[in-house]
Image (spheres, rainbow, N blue to C red):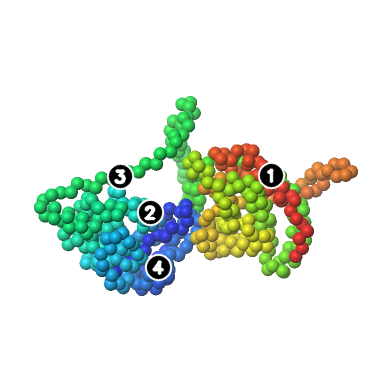
Amino acid sequence: MAQFELVMPKMGESIMEATILKWLKNEGDPIEAEESVLEIATDKVDSEVPSPVEGTLLKRLYNEGDVVEVGKPIALIEVAGDNTGDSSNDQTTAVQDTTPVSTGSNGNYNAPSPQPQVQVQIQNAATTLNKASANGNRFYSPLVLNIARQEGIDFNELERIAGTGKNARVTKKDMLAYVKQRSNGVSTAPTPQVQVQIQTPPPPAVPQSIAPSAKITAPPITYDGDNVEIIEMDRMRRMIADHMVMSKNVSPHVTSFTEVDMTDIVNWRNKIKTGFQQKEGQKITFTPIFVEAITKAISDYPRINSSVDGYKVIVRKNINIGMATALPSGNLIVPVIKDANHLNLIGLTKKVNDLANRARNNKLKADEVQGGTFTLTNVGGFGSLMGTPIINQPQVAILAVGIIRKMPAVMETEYGDVIAIRQKMIMSLSYDHRVVDGALGSTFLNRVKHYLETFDTSAEW
C-alpha cells in the first residue's frame, strides 16, 4: 500500500489560502476517485475538494475552521500500489513512489515505516527549485528516504546533506557517500541557504515633512457596559474587510462622476420586457445593458482594463466583467462574465441572470469568481444616488451606477430650450491614480455614458 497526499488546491491566481469548512469523510472511510473529501472556502467562493485517487482516508491533517495555505497537504489517503523503483530522477506523479509527504513541525519526517512508495517533503530547503513545489520546498525520493531511515538519519541531519542531482537533489550516490563518511567520523557541512533578491527601482524619496512617523492603527474602542451588542464578523465578512483595506493601501483612489439620461433605455425596456421574457425565457434588467456599454468603452480605452505590477502596467486583452452581487447574508460576491465583449445583449442577459441566481444560492464554481479585469457595482439597487466604490484588486477601475429616477431636465429642441421630466442616473468611476489619470478616467466614464445614451432602441422581441 502507498500513501497519496491530498493538497489544498489553488482556487485562482490571487488565492493564497483557504479555510476548511467541513470534512465530508472521517479517518478510515473509503474514498472513490473524484469523490468529495471536504468543503473549503476562500474570500471568493465555497467549494468541495475531490480526491483524484481511490483509497481510504488515513489521516486528516487539519481541523474544521483551520486556514491552510495553497499547496499544503491537508489529508493522507492510503491507496493500493506496488511501485518500488528508484525515483531519484526528480519525477513526481500522483500515486507512484514520488508522492510527497510533508514533514511535521517537530522536524521529523512523517513517513510510515518501510513504505518505499512514499516521498518526504522537508520544509526550508536551501537551493531546491522543484517544478512540483511553488514555494521552494526540498523533496526527497523514496529510496533516499529509506536509506535515511535505515541509517537512523534524522530530519536535521538529512537537511545538511549536499545534493549533486538535478536542482541540488540528494541522490542515492550522495546518501551512500555520506553514510560512508559518517561511519568514518567525517561530518558534512550544512547546505548553504541561498536567498534570491529581486531588484526593483527604489521608490521616490518622501520629503521628511510628509513621511509617516508611525504605523497607522485604529483607535481603541471602549465598551459602554451592557449597552452594546458585540457581533463577531463571519468568515466572508472578515475576508472582505481585509481585501478592502488592502485595496485602499495599495491604490490611490480617485473618483469621477457623470450624469446619464436613461429615458430611452427605460422606455425601451418597459416596452419589450414582457415579449423578451416570453421569447428568451429571461427577465431583462439594466445590468446587461450596462455591461455591454462598459465592454464597448473598454475596447476604445484598453488601458482601463489593466493591472499594476510594481512599475509595470499589465494590459489585459480579455474583457472579463465582474458584477458585484449582494448575498442574502448581507455579504458581497463578484461573479465574473468572461469575454463579455463576445456576447450580444441576449447572451449577456442569460449570463448575468445565471451568475446572479447561482451566487445567491451559493452554487458558483471557483473559476466563476476569478479572472475579472473590470468590475461593475449597482448601488442604485439599494436606493443610493451614487457611490465611490473601492477598486477590486488587482484591477485598476470599478464603475458604480446609482438609482434611476425622474428628474426635471433642460432639453434643447428646435423651438428652444424646454424643461422636461427625464429618467436620470448618476454614474461614478473609481480608478487607480498610479496608472489612470483624471483625463483617461473621465474620458472613459463619458464614453460609457455615450453608449448608454445612444443605445439602439429599435430592437424588437
Q: Amino acid at mark 1?
A: Asn
Q: Quadrant of residue 396?
A: top right
Marks 1 and 2 close (CB-CB < 8 Å): no
Marks 1 and 3 close (CB-CB < 8 Å): no
Residue 382 visible, this orientation: no
User: What is the C-alpha distance between the residues marked 2 and 3?
Assistant: 16 Å
**Which callout, 1 or 4, points at the residue further toward the start of the chain?**
4
Determine the residue positioned at 19% across, 61% down. 147
Determine the residue positioned at 13% across, 55% down. 180
Q: Which residue is mark 1?
A: 446
User: What is the C-alpha distance between the residues marked 3 and 4?
Assistant: 35 Å
Question: Considering the image in quadrants, where does the C terminus appear?
Answer: bottom right
Secondary element type, mark 4: loop
Determine the residue positioned at 29% across, 66% down. 97
User: What is the C-alpha distance between the residues marked 1 and 4?
Assistant: 50 Å
User: What is the C-alpha distance between the residues marked 1 and 2?
Assistant: 43 Å
Q: Amino acid at mark 2?
A: Ala
**Which callout, 4 or 2, points at the residue further toward the start of the chain?**
4
Instruction: State whether residue 211 is above or below residue 121.
Output: above
Q: Which residue is mark 4?
A: 51
Secondary element type, mark 3: loop
Q: Give the x, y percent position of residue 52.
A: 40, 68
Instruction: Report the disc number at residue 194.
Output: 3
Q: Residues within 10 Å of mark 2 (few under 14, many from 20)?
A: few
Viewer-side residue, 44 vs 127: 127
Determine the residue positioned at 39% across, 73% down. 32
Marks 3 and 4 close (CB-CB < 8 Å): no
Secondary element type, mark 1: helix
Q: Give the x, y percent position of residue 402.
A: 67, 49
Q: Give the x, y percent position of residue 305.
A: 58, 48
Viewer-side residue, 130 vs 74: 130
Question: Considering the image in quadrants, where does the N terminus appear?
Answer: bottom left
